[in-house]
Amino acid sequence: MRYKSKRYTWYYIFLIIKLFTLLTISSFSNDLISGYYFSEKSTQEIQNDDFTNPGFIWVELGKKIWNQGNNKNKNLSCYSCHGNISEMKGVSLSFPKVRGDKSKLINLEQQINICKAENMKGESFKPEDKNLLALATAITYQSRGLKQNIEINKKNKPWFEMGKKLYFKKIGQMGLACNQCHDERVGMNLRAEKVSQGHINGFPTYMLRWSKVASVHKRIQFCNEQARALPFKIFSDEYNALQLYLTWRGKGLQIETPAVRK
Amino acid sequence: MEKLRRLKYKKVVKKNEKIKIKTLAEHEMEPGVRRDPKTGIIYPRLIIQKVTAKYNGKIVFRANWFSGVSANPYLAFYISAQESGLLEVEWRDDYSRTSYKRGYLKVIDQQGNEILPIKYEI
Amino acid sequence: MNKIKRNTLKIFFGTLAFIFSKKTLANGNPYRDRFQSYRQTFRIEPNKLETERIIKNIIKDRELIKNLIRLDVPDTVEDGNVVPVTFAINCSMEENDFPKKVHVLALENPFPEVAIYEFFPKIGKAEVSFRCRMRTSSYIMIIAEMIDGSVSMEKKYVDVMLGACS
């Protein structure tokens, strides 16, 4: 009899702990938390120090390319039109945006490619090219510390709706939607990983698993593969729409580029 | 394009101070056991084998690395400042290709005068 | 005539080298250790015996000194590709008291030897921090060989959530 009661007390203690953790998790999901706080302390320490952060290799490379001339036109560079790279502060906050009057949504990498092809009369980069990511990282790095703040207006409203639909759509063999993990199961463990809120304020991010910088689209592709769904192509309209929705979702979060994530 | 090498330390120090020197190299550090996911071919090994630090031409620290060191390797070590001089870090890879990063270290005594490695006396 | 002489000399020295190499091979030196210094492009599975042999080869039956090494590694690491390691050796760094070589081993790796650090006298502090790869959760071991011939060893267990593919 005594043994039994003892066993039950432990059971109750366990239950209370479980309830408490569940409550804290649910209170978490009300406000926005950067992915930084979901990573392990050893990973956070790498990001804390700008010197040890390997993402800065990309930033330095990007700064170099910024001042460098084109292959065909030696005197045309990013610098010759835009001036110093520090003037690009806050530019990355408005992406992805609808391009001019053409009804096409583009993100920062695509904008760089358009600049490269049309204004500099050179060759545009391939998706996930190291130089392209370096430029994107260096430009986004200029607005580090600013808050994500994108406006939904008449122009990008249809894209926003499309992204929202994609976010709540169940896909793949597992039949998973983004919101099932990143809204409802935040803070729980997915095998060895802690489920974050899925914000993209640190992108382009240095990914430890690939030991290189990856773009938002690449990361979403990986997410889709994990859910056993067929991923879209990088720079596809679907991913741009999703990126727009995710940026809106993390409104108010500070930009951390180049962040370090698992 | 040339790979990035970073070297960071406190530029002006007092004598006998122990200074931390941080280095970061841009390198894939291919361990030689990874396969290409499509073709199944193993990527050949390519790592940085040796990192040597010289202070005024004298070796003060050496690291021998094998395939277990992570990509974009970071390394921090200490030296004690005795006199102003050149700080030089050399990375050497599998094919004995080397890359350098150099910097000047200024050492001052308690009065604030610089201690030079060569003393001029007449 | 000269050529023949040179050839005989070559054969003579060759056989000598061969005999001596056989002798050195016979005393249980780890083969894997030697692969390390060459470019190697084939898959190798981790082997416990080989690891023990490498450790034995470094220590060489010397007595271990305690409380010489301070090792800082995180208890849990998210990704085995980047495991931050910091170690410090408690010594005065004088001519007769400094670590000659410090070995870093990750015991479950296919190549357990991760790095060897060489120190020189009067350089301030024997403290190094770097980042290594780990295949699975295992011990990280630091073996310091001091200049006076004494050896010290320290190990800590690291939980790795996602192993590096090395």
Image (cartoon, rainbow, N blue to C red):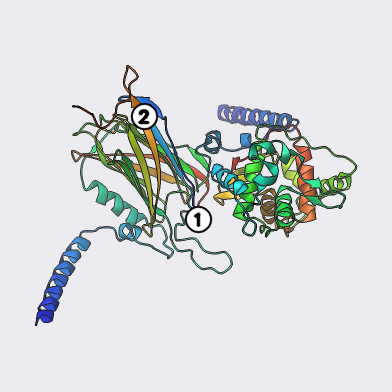
- In the rendered image, the residue lying farthest to the front is B122
Chain letter for the residue marked with disc 2 in the picture? B
Q: Is residue B45 left or right of residue A24?
A: left
Q: Of helix, strand and loop, which one carries label 2? A: strand
- Give whichever of C4, B100 is nearer the camera: B100
- Give whichever of B50, B113 is nearer the camera: B113
User: Whole-percent x and y of residue A210?
Assistant: 56, 52
- In the rendered image, the residue lying farthest to the bottom is C1
Q: Of helix, strand and loop, which one carries label 1? A: loop
Q: Quadrant of the N terminus of chain C?
A: bottom left
Question: In the rendered image, is residue A189 in sight?
Answer: no
Res. B106 mark: 2
Question: In the rendered image, is residue C121 in sight?
Answer: yes
User: Whole-percent x and y of residue A168?
Assistant: 81, 47
User: Whole-percent x and y of residue B115?
Assistant: 30, 26
The residue carrying mark 1 is C165
Q: CA distance from mark 2 to mark 1?
A: 44 Å
Identify which residue is drawn at 68% across, 58% down: A124
Say which amino acid is labelled 2: Lys
- In the rendered image, the residue lying farthest to the top is B111
Image quadrant in which you'd find residue A60: top right
Say which amino acid is labelled 1: Cys
Q: Is residue C111 left or right of residue C95?
A: right
Identify which residue is drawn at 16% across, 71% down: C14
Q: Is residue A163 above or below residue B44?
A: above
